[in-house]
């Protein structure tokens, strides 16, 4: 190891060596970051986490994609945002706050069904709130969003007289702890 003397710093040799050492450390850090990022991308660790959901299509997208098929769909989006609390886990005082923004697709041009959906707006919200309050967060996550939507669709269709909804979609489906 080289011991610096006052003469080294006086003639500028000490700072040059120090600058080279710092530059080498900076290069090593950049190489580590680049290699780590490359390895992460190659290994597929950048996939969506299990706690994240895929967004449902917008009502406009569902209506426009259905116009290409023989069965046109409209969207009932009047329910807005619903806040409810899930059933409490065993040993816990209360449940988890859940925020959902559901909307329904139905056969295009079915004004009678649209009017019935509008008239039974409170009843539909109540069905959705009661459904989610009957399950814990873990039970809902284990069921999967697709099964939740299918069950809600059938519960809502049970109370409809003038027609049936095709699907239930969620703009929001968020658990808050």
Image (cartoon, helix red, strand yellow):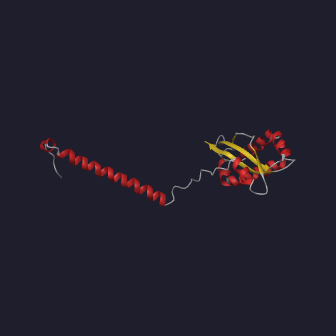
Q: Residue at x 25, y 50 (%)?
A: 20
Considering only vertical position in the picture, is 92 above or below 65?
Answer: above
Toward the viewer: 88 or 100? 100
Tell me the quarter of the image containing the C terminus: top right
Q: Residue furthest front?
A: 68
Tally of numbered discs: 0
On screen, residue 13 versus residue 82, left or right, reads left
Toward the viewer: 134 or 69? 69
- Residue 133: x, y in percent? 72, 44
On screen, residue 36 versus residue 140, left or right, reads left
Q: Residue furthest left?
A: 7
Q: Residue at x 65, y 51 (%)?
A: 141
Q: Residue at x 14, y 43 (%)?
A: 11
Q: Residue furthest bottom?
A: 43
Q: Residue furthest right?
A: 161
- Residue 122: x, y in percent? 79, 38
- Residue 41: x, y in percent? 48, 58
On screen, residue 152 versus residue 44, left or right, reads right
Toward the viewer: 130 or 52? 52
Q: Residue at x 63, y 44 (%)?
A: 175
- Residue 120: x, y in percent? 82, 41
């Amino acid at each position: 190891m080289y011991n610096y003397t006052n003469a080294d710093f006086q003639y500028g040799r000490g700072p040059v060596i120090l600058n080279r050492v710092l530059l080498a450390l900076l290069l090593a850090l950049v190489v580590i970051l680049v290699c780590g990022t490359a390895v992460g991308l190659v290994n597929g660790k950048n996939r969506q986490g299990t706690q994240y959901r895929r967004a449902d299509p917008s009502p406009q997208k569902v209506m426009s994609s259905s116009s290409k098929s023989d069965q046109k769909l409209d969207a009932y989006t009047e329910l807005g945002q619903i806040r409810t609390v899930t059933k409490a886990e065993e040993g816990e005082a209360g449940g988890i706050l859940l925020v959902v923004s559901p909307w329904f697709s139905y056969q295009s041009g079915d004004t009678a069904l649209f009017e019935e959906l509008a008239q039974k707006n409170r009843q539909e919200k109540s069905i959705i709130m009661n459904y989610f309050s009957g399950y814990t967060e873990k039970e809902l996550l284990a069921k999967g969003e697709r099964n939740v939507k299918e069950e809600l669709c059938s519960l809502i269709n049970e109370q409809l007289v003038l027609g049936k909804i095709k699907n239930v979609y969620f703009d929001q489906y968020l658990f808050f702890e």
